[in-house]
Image: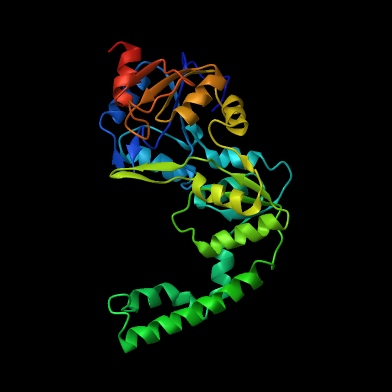
Amino acid sequence: MDKNSSEMTETWLIDLDGVIWRGDSLIAGSDEAVGALCAANKKIVFFTNNSFPTASSLTAKLQSMGIPASAENILTSSMAASRLLNEKSNVLCLGGPGLYEALVKSGHRPVFASTILSNAISNTEYASYLAYYAQSSFPQTVSAVDDDKSLVELTRMGVEFFTILDEIADAERFDACVVGIDPFSNFATLALGFRAISKGARLIATNDDSTYPMKSGLLPGGGTVFKILQTLTGSKGEVAGKPYEAAVELVRDTCDKVAYVVGDRLDTDGLLAKQLGAKFLLVYSGVTSPHGKSDTVLPFVEEENLKKVVYAILGI
């Protein structure tokens, strides 16, 4: 994203989840909207607070939906989070491949919490504890003798697993614990993050979104684990993604002046637009509903989806 080489008339900063797609489903008309912007010679940059996917996977997903994209016009909250660590740091990564990739590219040394856990329990009975859950017949008839044996055995494994967690949590010290959305997070990875922060690691979140839009509804968002760790440790922590300062600086350092920000959230996309001095275009295809507006951010245009806001601005 060369700030000096583009002859585009203006830059559009567009969110992905809830604007371009929900889960793996294209929101109707999004591809047409991006095509119209390209035809009108507008520069498009996609900025997502979703820290889980890598830039290349986002690019491939966009292209598979008929939307032109390259890694150069993808920004993520993972990229913003990596910028909060000024010195090369040992990082406990409570997130996905996109977060890990961004940290590595910035010269840091991340380790997945799940990797620490896997290494500790490989070649033990705990490596198959999920399979044990699946094979057990409880709680259908917990009074049955076999089910009682299953419950006793599971209790033993759980008690011993607490001891394992206690031991591996002290195995390495980290400069920071960076948290992002991760469908594979669990009690054990949370415990590792809690212990790392308690021993002095900085708590950094890629974003503090409470929800994540999918095709059939909302799921817990990237800020869920962050808020738990805040409560557990008493640490305020730092947030990198939209609309926080690290995200603002990321946009300013990599983009021409942004004319429009398109998003489905007032508290992230809307506030980011306000800080960038851009016009905010609100869509109702994601998290925010027509009844969920506030006086904090007033959209320049609000419509059902990306196609409608783009066509409204372009006068199509």
Q: Horizontal placement of 308 versus 113: left or right? A: left
Q: Horizontal placement of 10 versus 290: left or right? A: right
Percent position of residue 150, x then y: 38, 83
In the depicted view, which residue is nearer to us: 148 or 242? 148
Percent position of residue 178, x then y: 60, 49
In the depicted view, which residue is nearer to us: 96 or 269? 269
| Residue 171 occupies quadrant | bottom right
Residue 256 in sight: no
Instruction: Point out the image quarter for the N terminus.
Output: top right
Residue 293 vertical position relative to residue 134 in the rendered view, above or below: above
Residue 279 vertical position relative to residue 272 in the rendered view, above or below: above
Q: Residue furthest front?
A: 143
Display coloring: rainbow
Residue 1 in sight: yes
Percent position of residue 256, x then y: 55, 20
Q: Horizontal placement of 221 versus 238: left or right? A: left
Q: Residue furthest top?
A: 315
Residue 293 vertical position relative to residue 8 in the rendered view, above or below: below
Instruction: Point out the image quarter for the C terminus.
Output: top left
Residue 42 vertical position relative to residue 102 in the rendered view, above or below: above
User: What residue sits 55% from the left and 47% below the top?
Assistant: 227
